[in-house]
Amino acid sequence: MKTDANPSQRIKTLRETYGMSQEVLAERSAVPLELIKKIEDGMIPDLAPLVKIARTLGVRLGTILDEDRELGPVLTKKGEVRENLRFHSGKEAERTDALRYSVLAPGKAGRHMEPFLIDVPASAQTLRSSHEGEEFFYVLEGKIRLEYGTLVYELAEGDSIYYDSMVPHRAVALEGRDAKVLAVVYTPV
């Protein structure tokens, strides 16, 4: 695969490499065919379908998010972080209100955790997500409300939470202000 390919292109390339149609990928991953098509066209709605697709293709989530290149430590300096991914609900008008994910360890081969900086716009209307694994959130700026199953947690700068990501969850910025979160996602192989 090309190192400059985006997650949508990587999924398509892997699927085609394995001689798998979109229909077969949808059936095996339990991700609706229409969503598979949207993902391959560049619309990433949520982390959950990416986890299912990665498992179905037999790769780690990181393989879809970036190219594995480095066996040793991967250093990301301030100012080098760039937005890699946006999750949105699919309405074109909401794309500017999407959660914006920046991968913090691109290129780290064999990693088991996915560290992100997540910008949570005050106007974002995200859907609840659930997927295999665990997540850790540390609030860097602003305040967020984490809806976790039937529970609600409010977190301010410096607060953190660690949870099982199988439980439906979502993060919402509070007080009309954007928020920034350091998130680490673990998905079992």
Image: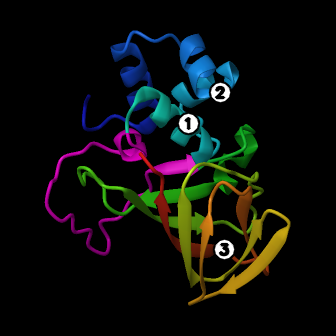
The local secondary structure at tag 2 comes to loop
- Which residue has dot 2 on it? 30
Of callouts 3 and 2, the N-terminal one: 2
The dot on residue 52 is 1
How far is mark 3 from mark 1, CA to CA?
29 Å
Query: Which of the 4 image quadrants contains residue 61?
Result: top left
For image coordinates 33% across by 16% down, the residue present is: 17
Which mark sits nearer the N-terminus, 3 or 1?
1
Quadrant into which the N terminus falls: top left
Quadrant holding the C terminus: top left
For label 1, the SS is helix
- What amino acid is labelled 2 in the image? Ala
Question: Is disc 1 surrounded by few (<14), some (14 to 19) or many (20+) residues within 10 Å?
Answer: many
Range of residues picked out in magenta? 60-86
The residue sitting at 53% across, 71% down in the picture is 136
Instruction: Give the residue at mark 3.
Output: 178
Q: Measured along the vertical axis of the image, is residue 34 above or below residue 132?
A: above
Tell whether label 2 touches label 1 (CB within 8 Å): yes
Along the viewing direction, whichever of 29 and 85 lies nearer the viewer: 29
In this view of the protein, which residue sits in the foreground, 141 or 18?
18
Q: CA distance from mark 1 to mark 2?
A: 8 Å
Which residue is nearer to you in this view: 101 or 15?
15
Query: Left or right: where does residue 171 sit relative to residue 13?
Result: right
Q: At 69% from the left edge and 83% from the top edge, which residue is drawn?
A: 155
